[in-house]
Image: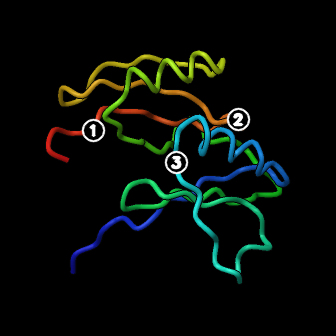
């Protein structure tokens, strides 16, 4: 049996979808996708992340993920860092892994996110 990653979900506080769209959609450049009608009333937002999806789901008793994180790969790491810095987002530099540069930031709710250079040929 072969498994592949379909989507990742992280939590967000209720009623803050505009901040999600501004951060993940506008600042990071992910494309929002429609949630299925049966789930739309629950709040949150879904985004395409390449062939996978990133879901932000509402959690009433929200607590940010400080260690667990999503890693998003990009061919434009320096440009993305510059946009995040210009927007006043925190940047935490870290050592390269497998020759790929990377850094950490936070979404508007304090969830940890890793931004890493895309693998060559990927």
Judge from the rendering whether residue 36 lies leftward or rightward of residue 69; answer left or right: right
Judge from the rendering whether residue 103 lies leftward or rightward of residue 17; answer left or right: left
Q: Which of 69 and 82 is in front in this view?
A: 82
36 to 122, vertically: above or below: below
Judge from the rendering whether residue 44 lies leftward or rightward of residue 50; answer left or right: right
Residue under the image location 60 percent in, 31 percent down = 106
Q: Which of 83 and 107 is in front in this view?
A: 83
Q: Which colour scheme is used?
A: rainbow
Residue under the image location 42 percent in, 24 percent down = 103
Q: Mark 1 points at which residue?
A: 118
Are the residues tagged 3 and 1 within 8 Å (C-beta)? no
Gap between marks 2 and 3 measured at Cα: 15 Å
Q: Nearer the viewer, mark 2 or mark 3?
A: 3
Q: Nearer the viewer, mark 3 or mark 1?
A: 3
Gap between marks 1 and 2 measured at Cα: 24 Å
Where residue 45 sits, quadrant-wise, is bottom right
Q: Quadrant of the N terminus?
A: bottom left
Q: Name the residue under label 3.
A: 30
Mark 1 residue element: loop
Mark 3 residue element: loop
Gap between marks 3 and 1 measured at Cα: 15 Å
Residue under the image location 35 percent in, 37 percent down = 74
Q: Which of 94 and 120 is in front in this view?
A: 120
**Total of numbered circles in the picture?**
3
Mark 2 residue element: loop
First in sequence: mark 2 vs mark 3? 3
Where residue 58 sits, quadrant-wise, is bottom right
Judge from the rendering whether residue 57 lies leftward or rightward of residue 1; answer left or right: right
Q: Name the residue under label 2.
A: 108
Residue 5's x, y, as percent?
A: 36, 64
First in sequence: mark 3 vs mark 1? 3
84 to 28, vertically: above or below: above
């Amino acid at each position: 049996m072969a498994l592949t990653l379909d989507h990742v979900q992280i939590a967000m506080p209720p009623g803050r979808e505009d901040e999600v769209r501004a951060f993940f959609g506008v600042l990071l450049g992910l494309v929002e996708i429609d949630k299925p009608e049966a789930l739309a009333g629950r709040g949150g937002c879904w985004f395409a992340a390449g062939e996978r999806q990133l879901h932000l789901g509402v959690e009433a008793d929200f607590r940010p993920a400080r260690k667990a994180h999503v890693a998003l790969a990009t061919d434009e790491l320096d440009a993305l860092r510059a946009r995040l810095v210009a927007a006043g987002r925190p940047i935490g530099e870290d050592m390269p892994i497998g020759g790929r540069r990377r850094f950490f930031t936070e979404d508007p709710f304090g969830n940890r996110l890793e931004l890493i250079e895309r693998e060559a040929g990927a």
